[in-house]
Image (spheres, rainbow, N blue to C red):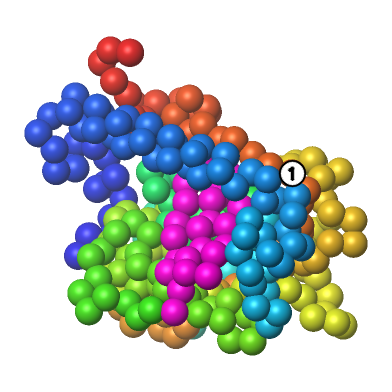
Amino acid sequence: MTNGRNALHPANQNCTSNGSHRAVSLSRALLQTAAVIFLAASVAPAYAQSHDRNLNGMHLSSDIPNLNGVWARDTHGYPKPYIVNRQIADGYENEYLKPWVVEQLERDELVTVAGRTLITPHSICYPESVPYAYGGTQVNIVQTPSEITMLFGDQGQWRTIYLNRPHPDHVEPSWWGDSVGHYEGDTLVIDTVGFAVNPQAGSMGRYGTPHSDQLHLVERWRFLREGEVSTAPEPRNDSFNAADVVEGGKVMRLTFTLEDPIAYRKPWSVTLDYLELDARIREYACAENSRFWDLTPLLPSAATP
C-alpha cells in the first residue's frame, strides 16, 4: 500500500517512457473534456427547469427530491473536525486520525509553509475524487430514474452514481470508487467504496486527507427543511456571479461521513450547504490555466501539437 505523495510524479508511474506517459495523459484529458462538454450540452436546458417534475420527459415520484440543476458554494475547501485554526488538533493524540496520517499532513504543511506548491491531484490535473471534489464550488446534478451524474465546475470532471443496485462482488479500485445510491424519503443516500490508494491531497488548507483502500464514504443529499438554518456563506462573486443565485431558491444540504479503519480512529463527518443557481456550470481548463510555476514540469503535455 502506497501512502506517499511521490507516486504522483510521472517518473514513478508505470509507463514505458516520459513521452508516452505525457501523450496518454493528454489523450485521456482530451477525451474526458469532450465527454463532459457533450454531457453538459445535452442537459443545458435542464438548469432553467429545475422545478419541472417531468424534466426532459422523465417523471419524478413526488416523494423523490428533484436535485437537477447547478448548485454552488461561494467558498473553497470545507471544515474538518480534526483541524483547529489550521493545526492538527492534539497532533498524534488526534481523536480522529491515526499517527501515519498526522505525519503525512504535517509533512504537507511544511511544503506550504516553505512557500512551495503542494503536489496534489488538483495542482497537476489528476482526477480529484470525492470528497476532495467538494472543496470546489460548483456541481451540476443530472438526475434520471436509473443513475445520477455529477459534473464539477471547478475541475471539469464528473462521477456517476447508479441507483437501486448493490456494489459489484468485486470492485475494481479507481480514482472515484464505485458509487451506488437510493432514496430514503426526501434524502438521496450514496454509498461509495473501492477508492484506489492514489497519493491523495492532504494539507491543513482546502485539501483532502490521506486514506487507505478501506475508505468508505456515505453521502446524504437533501433540501433544508422548514426551520433549518443555512450554513452557506453569502455569495460574494468570488466563485460565481452572485446575481445567478435563485432568489428564494432552495438550499441543498450535503452531509458526508468517512470511515477507514486503517487511516482513521473513528468516522468523521462534514456538512455543506449549496445555493441554487440559474446559470450554466462554469468552464474550467486545468493544464491551460496553470498558475503553479514549480509544478509546470509535471503537467500533461505533448511533444507536438
The residue that disc 1 covers is 279
Residue closest to the far top: 304
| Residue 17 point in image, percent of width and height | 12, 29
Q: Position of residue 109 (x, y in %)?
A: 47, 52
Residue 147 drawn in magenta: yes
91 lies above or below 14? below
Foreground residue among 116 and 39: 39
Categorize mark 1 by other alpha carbons within 10 Å: few (<14), some (14-19), many (20+): some
Q: Quadrant of residue 276?
A: bottom right
**Residue 71 seen in this snapshot:** no
Q: Residue at x 17, y 28 (%)?
A: 20
Q: Report the amino acid beneath label 1.
A: Ala
Q: Which residues are magenta?
A: 140-164
Q: Report helix, strand or loop for mark 1.
A: loop
Residue 282, quarter of picture: top right
Chief secondary structure of the magenta portion: strand
Rendered position, 265 above or below 177? below
Q: Nearer the viewer, residue 208 or 191?
A: 191
Residue drawn where x is 62% and y is 60% of the image: 57
Image quadrant holding the C terminus, namely top left
Q: Residue at x 45, y 57 (%)?
A: 159
State the image coordinates of residue 217 (x, y, percent, origin top left). 44, 74
